[in-house]
Image: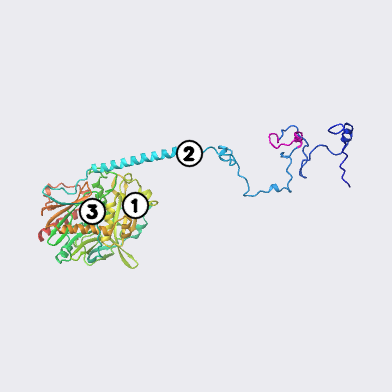
Amino acid sequence: MAFEVGAVPFNPDGWGPPDATTATTKSSSLPLNVPFAPFSRAEKLGRIADWTRNNPNAGRPNAGKNASDSVFDFTADDSFPSSGGGGDEDFRLVDGKLPTRPKFGPKWRFNQHRPQLPQRRDEEVEAKKREAEKERARRDRLYNLNRSNQNQQRREAAAFKSSVDIQPEWNMLDQIPFSTFSKLSFAAPEPEDLLLCGGLEFYDRTYDRVTPKNERRLERFKNRNFFKVTTTDDPVIRRLANEDKATVFATDTILATLMCAPRSVYSWDIVVQRVGNKLFFDKRDGSQLDLLAVHETSQEPLPEAKDDINSAYSLSVEAAYINQNFSQQVLVRDGNKVAFDEPNPFASEGEEVASVGYRYRRWKLDNEMYLVARCEVQSVAEVNNQRSFMTLNALNEFDPKYSGLDWRQKLETQRGAVLATELKNNANKLAKWTAQALLGSADMMKLGYVSRVHPRDHFNHVILAVVGYKPRDFAAQINLNTSNMWGIVKSIVDLCMKLNEGKYVLVKDPSKPQVRIYEVPGDAFENDYVEEPLPEDEQVQPPAEAVENGEANGIVDDLEDKKIEATVA
């Protein structure tokens, strides 16, 4: 069947169809001047023309010439889907989907095609912010500087008094600033053990698993005696001196005090006795060396009142008490001990003594000079079928507001921060413990973290954690140079060996980083109340509960030692 286009009449009189063909046109089966709107075969034809809607192309520069045809244009109408290839527009690529435009916020931020706003205003805002940050940082820096200066002035204004009363008849021979100690160096050879005394109990490894959540109560060991005997009162050192085993004699506590002198803030004193060609380093009875300083290197001042539980003296006594009990609690107390060549030289027969081993060791300082020191270790452990010596010490927390860290909250998650804070506040004490561990050739040093049950209760304590360190590694961590330590000892020994026979005192200046050497009379420090006690009826009797058995026994032992010394002399 052929396709009939139809007849197209010609109008010779003008434009448009002639009037005579109107009937013919109306009778035609095809619509005239109606554009074809594409539609799907599944859709019904909705409308042919719509004069009620606006022209969608009006206002566009390339709008069609025949505006009357717009009523038949449904290309922008959703009623007529576009002519596609069988509904391919229903398929979308996952990555090709355009991001949706947010319905809030300034539109110019999200429109990438529009020109951006001028940047000058933003640059000015940023510049003002930077200036404000610099000004705030400058104020904070000045505030912290003034605050640290005030603390330093307050600590200096606290006027740390000298550990010993300087008498007018004492003759000051020399004063050595600590700045000269930093340049000293001496490579000490490996020491040799001359004698081992005492006995050690084994370390209880269960304390390595103690945490703040399963803390252990600190026990009290009233029946075990602890001895703090000075150099010249040690019978073993007397025997070694008579045998000419060395020229210089001291204890590990005294040597550690000298080695770590540049880190000290509080005043301390050491008695030096030159007898013939021999040199003895002693401590006075009741010396500060028997106590443990707390917050010595901290910038936060402690209360000045001596009877305050947080004063420097009260805290040092509390720290010494904690260390003694801690060193005995972390042991396996089953009666199994490692006995050495000789028993404890300071204990009487049948007396219960603390677990401690004395190693009398000798170092060679030069061709004609040897040094003998009594070093202490508190425990032993079996590691790979070999005995490893340990030193046991405890750091104590008295009030978190002074340190700024609460151990119960930070020990498990920020143990490094707790140790760093202790290194800042107790640099001298930790350095002395490390030096004593190195002098005794301890294989491990155990540090316990002991805190008060309550900040205002200085009698009851708990163990929160126990951490072990190798002494050499810990010394490197706290920047403790072994060569420099021995250089300080060697320089002081050389200086004292040039003195005449007699008695001298090394005193750390309470307000300046320097040490002074005084020449004192031969009978200085001998007329103490311990040597010549008052009659019993004139003595002030303390409360019965305040007197510990260990302290009473220690005083009695001191009196007996003094009597023996006087008899020998």
Query: Looking at this view, is 462 or 542 the one in front?
Result: 462
Asked whether residue 328 appears in the rendered view, the answer is no
Circle 2: is it few (<14), some (14-19), or many (20+) Cα within 10 Å? few
Q: Quadrant of residue 439?
A: bottom left
Q: Horizontal placement of 22 versus 508: left or right?
A: right
Q: Which callout, 3 or 2, points at the residue further toward the start of the chain?
A: 2
Say which residue label 2 marks. Answer: 123
At 36% across and 55% down in the image, what residue appears? 210
Tag nearer the camera, 3 or 2: 2
Q: Quadrant of the C terminus?
A: bottom left
Q: Horizontal placement of 4 versus 140: left or right?
A: right
Q: Which callout, 1 or 2, points at the residue further toward the start of the chain?
A: 2
Q: Amino acid at mark 1?
A: Leu
Q: Which mark is residue 419?
A: 1
Say which residue label 3 marks. Answer: 180
Asked whether residue 67 appears in the rendered view, the answer is yes
Reply yes or no: does residue 554 show up in magenta. no
Q: How many marks?
A: 3
Q: CA distance from mark 1 to mark 3?
A: 29 Å
**Contact flag, marks 1 and 2 (Cβ < 8 Å):** no
Q: Quadrant of residue 152?
A: top left
Which residues, given as a range, are shown in magenta?
Answer: 56-72
Q: Amino acid at mark 3?
A: Thr
Tag nearer the camera, 1 or 3: 3
Query: Looking at this view, is 78 or 408 the one in front?
Result: 78
Percent position of residue 554, x then y: 19, 55
